[in-house]
Amino acid sequence: MFDRLPEYPWEQLKPYSAKAALHVGGAVDLSVGSPVDPTPAIIQDALNASSNAPGYPSTGGSPEFKAAVVEWFERRRGVSGLKPEQVMPTIGSKELISWLPLLMGLGPGDVVVQPKVAYTAYVVGAALCGAEIISEDDPAKWPANAKLIWINSPGNPDGRVLDVHEMKAAVDRARELGALLASDECYAELGWGQWSDKLIPSVLDPRVCGNSHDGVLAVYSLSKQSNMAGYRAAFAVGEASLIKGLVNLRMHSGLNTPGPVQRAMVVALGDEEHVAVEKEIYRERREVLLEAVRAYGFSVAESQAGLYLWATLGEDCWKTVDRMADLGIVVVPGTFYGESSTDFVRFSITATDDKIAEGARRLRDAIGLSKA
């Protein structure tokens, strides 16, 4: 009865983590994208101040929370005109991603579409309800029986950013099929290169979806930009009737975001300074690691935003994982993210400054480019 999903993929990394741990100085674990920096004090203070919460929280979100999300989307994502009834909090973004197909009533005979290079939770959602999963980036190739289509921009693991034209093509095709177009946008505040100072488009942008949010849903998390992974602080915004239906099902299921967490999100969404500070920390870590990864011989693809380097040595990814473990570095094989990624690995930049510097040093030492 529990065989609908294989063993959690990170279990396969354990032997390589153990091998890396034998390295002098221990392992540099660049495999998991979990924040390590402190949650900003203003967010901790908001949580503490709201800790007296004897009553059940609102499944649909408090009015204060909904207003904060609407204001944030206008200020930081260029999306105006949202209404509070289009917003709901979620218990982290992965929870909604994994359960959305089931909440939509999908099952055998229905198709869920994910990107060719895809975060692992989309296939989980399809498996839990018995739907078929298809990996396809080209909207023209999405099948007629597709009911839910996931896009992910910025992408995890590859850091790919979809522009307005690409997102509009996705929305147009999904509407033609009568499918829900769900956009996972959790890294939108973390753009690099050409996206460093530009707003990364949202599926809710009027240039993408026109004057209507029918058939679209945006999913966002504060785990990355605000170091709130332990809070399970996220939200979904989209077509009002869809949100109403999801809230009703979530009320029946007891899927409530705690009131203190909603209050902490209000404060986090209203403060841009801590996001800018954390982004600068990640920028410095990224530059240190990126230089060393390229010097070692990796080609880095996409990686335009987010917290990862998507890199290849042109060999089987598990060979690269083993090669890195010999250096005491743990990375993620591309096979975790789809059949089209068998020669890629993912480096995370969420480790501490010291760990990032040590990983970069080991990569340089391996090819005789040690720096003082």
Image: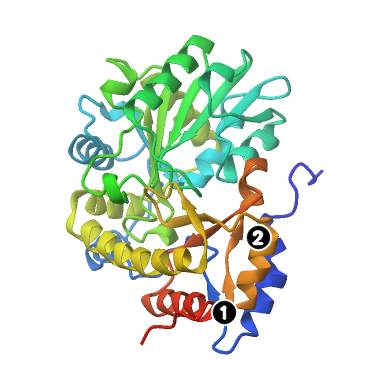
Image quadrant containing the C terminus: bottom left
The answer to whether marks 1 and 2 mark residues whose Cβ atoms lie closer than 8 Å is no
What residue do we see at 72% from left, 71% from top?
15
Helix, strand, or loop for circle 2? helix
Find the residue positioned furthest to the top: 176
Where residue 333 appears, x then y in whole percent? Answer: 63, 57
Answer left or right for 316 relative to 285.
right
Q: Is residue 49 visible?
A: no
Image quadrant containing the N terminus: top right
Tag of residue 27: 1
Q: Nearer the viewer, residue 26 or 241?
A: 26
What residue do we see at 48% from left, 15% from top?
173
Q: Is residue 62 visible?
A: yes
User: For residue 65, what is the image quadrant?
Assistant: top left
253 is higher (above) or lower (below) than 210? below
Where residue 118 appears, x then y in whole percent? Answer: 56, 41
Where residue 171 appears, x then y in whole percent? Answer: 42, 20
Pointer 1 or 2: first along the chain: 2
Answer left or right for 25 relative to 358.
right
Look at label 1 and name its amino acid: Ala
Where residue 355 appears, x then y in whole percent? Answer: 44, 77
User: For residue 319, what is the image quadrant?
Assistant: bottom right
Q: Nearer the viewer, residue 370 or 247?
A: 370
The residue indicated by pointer 2 is: 10
User: For residue 37, what is the image quadrant?
Assistant: bottom left
Q: CA distance from mark 1 to mark 2?
A: 16 Å
